[in-house]
Image (cartoon, helix red, strand yellow):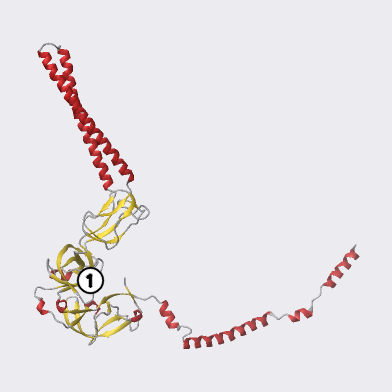
Amino acid sequence: MATGSTTTSADALSKLKIRRDQTADRPSFIFRLFRGIVVLLILAAVGGGVIALGVGRGWIPDTDRLMEAVRQKPEVRVATVSLETGRSADATVVATGYLESRQQARIGARATGRIEAVLVEEGTRVLANDVLAILEHADLDASLAAMEAAAARCRSELQEQDVAIQRALQDFRRAEKSLAAKTMTAAEFDTEKYEYDAAVARRGSLEAALLLAEARVQEAKQLRENMFVRAPFAGTVISKDAELGESILPGGMGEASGRGSVVTIADLEHLEVDCDVKEDFISRVTQGQSAEVAVDAVPGKRYQGKVRKIIPMGDRARATVKVRVALVDADEKLFPEMSSTVYFLSAETKESTEQETSRVFCPNDAIQSAGSETFVWVVGSEDRLRRMVIQTGEKKEDRTEVLSGLQGGEKVVVSPSQEFREGMPVRAAQ
């Protein structure tokens, strides 16, 4: 047994051989690593040359420009340099705001329903009580017809009762004569009398029933009237808020619960500017004061206005007071929500003092000084800063006349930072 086991082990060991020819053909790990490093160095050298060539020819962006694009642009507040002519240049206070209609309302229905018809479009002029839209009301029509039929029945019953009263009255008068002639007993007379009194009393009950039926008719008519959306005042449709087939809910909170209004109308013949005046200058604004209004959408024209109301409430956060200036000569070019500039004129400013020469004014908060130089930061093309040296003239409250360096219309940075530099990219605050 031992001899056989030894022989078997020797045979197994003899079969374990190393193939020298196959091992020699396989590269070693160190050789392969060295070859990989050499290839990477070659690729890096070639790639560096390609990148340099690409940057030089504009194929690949410069690293500085890439970093500048990635870097967050600082947000700045900007104001527009104004170009003013005539009386506006002598204004005591200047404020900005937006046009509003003195009367403007979103018109909805007084009841829940689905729109059957919308009778107006944007721009349609309407009069007070004109029908703007109709809600489905076939069920209310049927209910009204039933109420009117019930009222008609009550009237018929009342007329029938009047006839019964006349007959009972005649019977009662005959009974009185018969009782006087002693041809009728007292009991029979009482019966005739009670029948007459009952007929009169029943008429009172039928009159009350008729009043109730007529009241229900009026109620049904009012419910039906609620299906008609009417204009509360004369104006122009400026927004169509719902379409055919949509549901209307009084005070609806959006599409999920139904529309709350059908249209929005505004009185475009009575426009006013809602503007904010700084607290420092509100003492220069008085009720009924004359003003000129410049609307950005209508360049080259100044509208005449008067201070209609000074709201007796200040804004603590912004340090302003709200003032409403009514336009005297509003025309068809003006619409609500247009941005406007109001120039409040002093009592001494007369029509005869108007000048044709234009004057440039810049907000005081945008003007800086460095030594003998006075300059502003202008947001130029591609939203990059430009340092513009200016020469200033007369100072008026929150603005200063610019004699040279600006032409009007430029966007200047308000309260600029000391870290600003030429060509620095920025973004204007919304």
Viewer-proximal residue, 128 or 44? 128
Residue 320, image x and y in percent? 20, 67
Count of labels shown? 1
Q: In the image, is residue 340 above or below residue 184?
A: below
Viewer-proximal residue, 307 or 77? 307
Q: In the image, is residue 214 above or below residue 163?
A: below
Q: Tell me where residue 41 sits by quadrant.
A: bottom right
Residue holding disc 1: 340
Question: Could you tell me which residue is drawn at 20 percent across and 32 percent down?
Answer: 207
Viewer-proximal residue, 240 or 417? 240
Residue 86, image x and y in percent? 15, 79
Q: Tell me where residue 39 sits by quadrant.
A: bottom right
Residue 368, image x and y in percent? 24, 81
In what quadrant of the picture does the C terminus appear? bottom left
Q: Is residue 35 left or right of residue 86?
A: right
Question: Could you tell me which residue is drawn at 10 percent across and 76 percent down?
Answer: 351
